[in-house]
């Protein structure tokens, strides 16, 4: 096998070297064309072998990374003694993490069911005491399901379990549309810090179109004389793009998709984000959240220093 | 038995030579590591270099059987940790990082990649110690000139150098080197190297917004023509679309680099090796992973384009969409 490999490499090198030559008139004879053809076939075969090897490596990596225990049962199953003990241990583990995100964002794939996904993420954020959650779906599917999501969050057993049997106070936001769940409006008007969690539903329109809208707005301000172009700097733009409840931009982004690409998530908000990508190696969104949070707890942030 | 012994020893020799050649590429790049070599050692090194160069050419030809990205960006992270790991001064790590950059540019040129962007210095990095910042500025000033004047990539392959970022923050001598490098290579037809120095994506986006507002104010553009394309054209690195973003040293974040470009379906790869240890095999592995995902990325981008065209005609952007 080794000898065959060595022979193949040496043949390819020799063919690669020979196929580049032509005669003095620049014409390529039949022999050179044959060499070229053989070389191309051999190179494509090696390319295919390398591609298969790489896919196999990725599959092995995913298989080895399967979680040791299933976290899904902790919020979905009824409260048996065993489940309560495991849940308490998990809460302790979350509290022992050296750092936790203040603002957690999840990028869902197109095929993910929006209502179930938001409910799961909300429950886990409440349990881990992460105060701000953003859920992103490029095509705006979350906006269309806003009412269903609000209803589900209000009646969810897993969120109740995550909040230790108490109704979680949730602020659900989609642009200008806000829904308060688990609390009344008067209590909310006192101070927004009373919420267990703020949830924002984002789509593509919160990113690039938002920056275009900001630019147009600034053009209008310049036109009426309330702003000078030279005053437009990073701080000015940042002030216009800050979170309405005052949270920082997402610290941790869970990319829950097979493709390791950011599908047009608002670019300005990516600046300080740690990205955690998982899909096939995770047993579900719960497992993905759990691993992302543990991974975040281990990282070192240097902030350019 | 005899032939087996002969073939085995040939194989072991070839493997050893390859190992020395590959290991030698980054170890030998440490600044200040120079020692007297015997003629035999020099001969071995020449053979290793020739062999690894041939092997590299074969590997590149294998890769070219699949699609090749047009624009790849690197966050060259890990120089200081590399220096600490090898017990040399920090500036030695940065020098090793520059050496690796020239290697990577050669590989990209061989592969036929037309645009390479590198994150050389962040605006945040001015917070580092004055000695380190001065050393980095000196390195940049000297190496940009060397790259523009003497490098094979410029002379033989027509590399074009552009420096993207807020150059007004730099000392004058560095700005002069930048102007020299850009002017002397601006008509080169080959690969384009965008050196982001000093750079932050939020600074880039806000500068683009300011430029757009200035153009509208001066009458060069109408408010109705303000759209994503006109904003994108005013970025420090307007195009082409970024295909792959690579970050070394194992960190998994953007650190405020090319956020606009990365957000548009760029393939992300986080490599668990310091920048001076980044090898051709890391590069080829990244390329194969991208080639495997290429079709899916193209499909998703096409779907996105269709959605964008459908919504452009009817959508009205308002302040309520601002996050």
Image (cartoon, coloured by chain):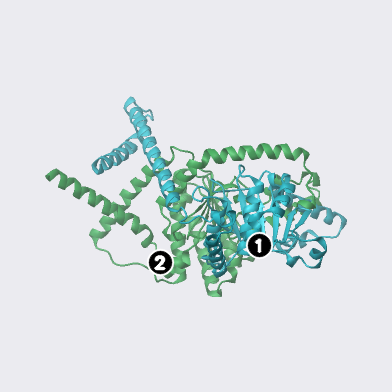
**Which residue is depicted at the point 43% across and 37% down?**
B65
Residue B169 horizontal side relative to residue B113, left or right:
right
Q: Position of residue B213 (x, y in %)?
A: 77, 53
SS at mark 2 in the image: loop
**Which residue is depicted at the point 70% across and 53% down?**
A155
Which is more toward the observer, B165 or B138? B165
Q: Nearer the viewer, mark 1 or mark 2?
A: 1
Q: Which residue was labeled with disc 2? A: B31
Q: Position of residue B61 (x, y in %)?
A: 40, 40
Which is more toward the observer, B224 or A120? A120
Position of A257 relative to A22 (above/below)? below
Residue B118 horizontal side relative to residue A209, left or right:
left
- Say which colour chain B has: green
Kindly give the residue lying farthest to the front in the view shown.
A80
Kindly give the residue lying farthest to the right in the view shown.
A224
Report the quarter where the C terminus of chain A lies: bottom right
Position of A13 relative to A301 (above/below)? above
Kindly give the residue lying farthest to the left in the view shown.
B2
Q: Position of residue B147 (x, y in %)?
A: 49, 56
Mark number, residue A165: 1
SS at mark 1 in the image: loop
Mark number, residue A200: none
Q: Is residue B230 visible?
A: no
- Say which colour chain A has: cyan
- Chain letter for mark 2: B
Q: Residues within 10 Å of mark 1 (few under 14, many from 20)?
A: few
Q: Whole-Å distance between the Cαs marked 1 and 2? A: 62 Å
Report the quarter where the N terminus of chain A lies: top left
Do tags 1 and 2 sit on the same chain? no
**Which residue is depicted at the point 27% across and 51% down?**
B15
Q: Residues within 10 Å of mark 2 (few under 14, many from 20)?
A: some
Residue B164 horizontal side relative to residue B206, left or right:
left
């Amino acid at each position: 096998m080794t000898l065959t490999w060595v022979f193949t490499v040496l043949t390819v090198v020799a063919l690669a070297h020979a196929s580049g030559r032509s005669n003095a008139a620049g014409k390529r004879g039949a022999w050179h064309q044959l060499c070229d053809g053989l070389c191309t076939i051999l190179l494509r075969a090696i390319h295919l072998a390398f591609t298969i090897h790489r896919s196999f490596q990725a599959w092995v990596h995913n298989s080895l990374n399967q979680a040791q225990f299933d976290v899904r049962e902790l919020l979905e199953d009824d409260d048996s003694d065993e489940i309560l003990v495991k849940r308490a241990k998990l809460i302790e583990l979350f509290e022992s993490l050296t750092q936790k995100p203040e603002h957690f964002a999840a990028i869902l794939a197109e095929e993910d069911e929006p209502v179930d996904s938001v409910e799961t993420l909300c429950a886990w954020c409440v349990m881990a005491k992460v105060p701000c959650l953003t859920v992103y779906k490029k095509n705006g599917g979350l906006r269309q399901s806003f009412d269903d999501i609000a209803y589900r969050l209000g009646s969810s057993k897993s969120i109740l379990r995550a909040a230790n049997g108490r109704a979680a106070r949730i602020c659900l936001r989609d642009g200008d549309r806000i829904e308060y769940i688990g609390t009344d409006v008067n209590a909310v008007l006192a101070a927004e810090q009373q919420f267990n969690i703020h949830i924002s539903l984002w789509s593509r329109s919160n990113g690039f179109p938002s920056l275009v809208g900001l630019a147009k707005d600034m053009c209008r301000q310049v036109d009426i004389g309330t702003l000078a172009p030279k005053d437009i700097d990073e701080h000015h733009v940042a002030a216009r793009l800050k979170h309405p409840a005052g949270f920082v931009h997402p610290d941790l982004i869970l990319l829950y998709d097979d493709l390791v690409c950011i599908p047009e998530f608002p670019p300005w908000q990516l600046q300080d984000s740690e990205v955690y990508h998982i899909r096939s190696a995770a047993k579900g969104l719960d497992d993905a959240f759990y691993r992302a949070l543990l991974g975040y707890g281990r990282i070192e942030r240097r902030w350019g220093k | 038995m005899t032939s087996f012994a002969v073939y085995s020893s040939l194989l072991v020799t070839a493997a050893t030579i390859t190992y020395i050649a590959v290991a030698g590429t980054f170890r030998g790049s440490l600044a200040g590591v120079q020692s007297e070599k015997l003629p035999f050692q020099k001969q071995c090194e020449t053979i290793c270099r020739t062999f690894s160069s041939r092997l590299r050419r074969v590997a590149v030809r294998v890769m070219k059987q699949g699609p090749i990205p047009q624009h790849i960006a690197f966050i060259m992270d890990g120089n200081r940790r590399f220096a600490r790991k090898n017990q040399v001064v920090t500036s030695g790590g940065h020098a090793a990082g520059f050496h690796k950059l020239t290697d990577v540019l050669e590989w990209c040129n061989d592969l036929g990649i037309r645009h390479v962007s590198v994150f050389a210095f962040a605006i945040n990095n001015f917070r580092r110690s004055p000695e380190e910042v001065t050393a980095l500025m000196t390195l940049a000033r000297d190496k940009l000139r060397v790259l523009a004047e003497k490098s094979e990539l410029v002379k033989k392959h027509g590399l074009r150098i552009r420096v993207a970022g807020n150059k007004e923050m730099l000392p004058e001598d560095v700005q002069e080197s930048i102007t020299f490098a850009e002017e002397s290579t601006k008509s080169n037809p080959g690969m384009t190297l965008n050196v982001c120095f000093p750079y932050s994506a939020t600074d880039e986006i806000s500068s683009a917004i300011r430029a757009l507002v200035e153009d509208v104010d001066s009458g060069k553009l109408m408010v109705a023509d303000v759209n994503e394309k006109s904003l994108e054209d005013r970025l420090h690195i307007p195009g082409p679309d970024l295909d792959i973003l690579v970050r070394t040293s194992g960190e998994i974040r953007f650190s405020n680099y090319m956020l606009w470009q990365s957000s548009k379906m760029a393939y992300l790869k986080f490599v668990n090796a310091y920048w001076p240890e980044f090898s051709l095999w890391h590069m080829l592995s990244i390329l194969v992973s991208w080639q495997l995902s290429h079709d899916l990325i193209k499909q998703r981008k096409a779907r996105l384009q269709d959605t964008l065209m459908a919504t452009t005609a009817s959508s009205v952007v308002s302040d309520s969409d601002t996050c």
